[in-house]
Amino acid sequence: MNMAEKKQEPMQPAANPGIARREFFLRVGLGSIGIAAAGTAAFTYQFLSPNVLYEPSPVVNMGKPESYQLDSVTLVVDARIFVVHLKEGFFALNAVCTHLGCLTAWKPDLGIIACPCHGSKFAVFQPPDKKPGEKFDGPAPKPLPWLKMSLNDEGELMVDRSEEIRPLTFVRV
Ligand code: FES
């Protein structure tokens, strides 16, 4: 049998193109619905979740008053607070410089608080005519704020970093 005689089979159409096409569109449709449902669920979860910013409490425990000697200035580095104990009582100063936010330092030999960044100086024992925290030199625009201090039920000093108070408000123990 030569090649010319070989009977050519007519091309058969695919098994059933209508079903394949239908299945394709069904899958695309289901996929779209799935994506839309996932997006809606994510949006709903975000919408219903409380819109809360979790931050550490501004109130910090400074411990027992007995741990601070009379006429002492103690920098609590983690809290960025000075705890000062004078004969008038206790108070807390924010240790963050009011110029550009550097952490200030206690200078016991000078009786002042000084900023290492641009040289602002804040009174404690010196100069005698200034209130503690008051700026007397350098570029800082404001004094170091006095922070609200209180005693808790255990007799420990608590400082609220979020609340500034009037200077010369002492906690007496
Ligand atoms: S940051 Fe303290 S003087 Fe500039």
Image (spheres, grey):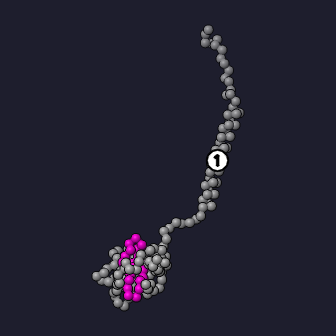
Q: Which residue is drawn at the image coordinates 48% and 83% (left, top)?
A: 165
**Residue at 31% over, 79% down:** 107
Label 1 neighbourhood size at 10 Å, few (<14), some (14-19), many (20+)? few
The residue carrying mark 1 is 34
Is 84 on the left-hand or right-hand side of 18?
Answer: left
Which quadrant would residue 29 be assigned to in this image? top right
Magenta span has 165? no
Camera sees residue 138 = no
> In the image, which residues are magenta?
74-94
The answer to if 88 sits in the magenta stretch is yes
Relative to 8, 154 lies left or right: left
Q: Is residue 106 above or below residue 32?
A: below
Per the image, label 1 sits on a secondary structure element best described as helix
- Quadrant of the image for the C terminus? bottom left
Q: Nearer the viewer, residue 78 or 6?
A: 78
In the rendered image, residue 135, in percent from the top left (x then y), is placed at: 38, 83
Q: Quadrant of the N terminus?
A: top right
> Viewed as shown, does residue 172 lie left or right of 128?
right
In the displayed orientation, state which residue is furthest to the bottom: 129
Quarter of the rendering containing residue 66: bottom left
The secondary structure that most of the magenta stretch takes on is: strand
The image quadrant of residue 73 is bottom left
17 versus 141 height, above or below: above
Residue type at mark 1?
A: Gly
Measured from the top left, where is residue 23 in percent x and y? 68, 37
Instruction: Give the percent coordinates (x, y) of residue 26.
Output: 68, 40
Q: Residue furthest right?
A: 18
Please give the name of the residue rendered at 37% of the width and 91% of the height, measured from the top-left corner: 129
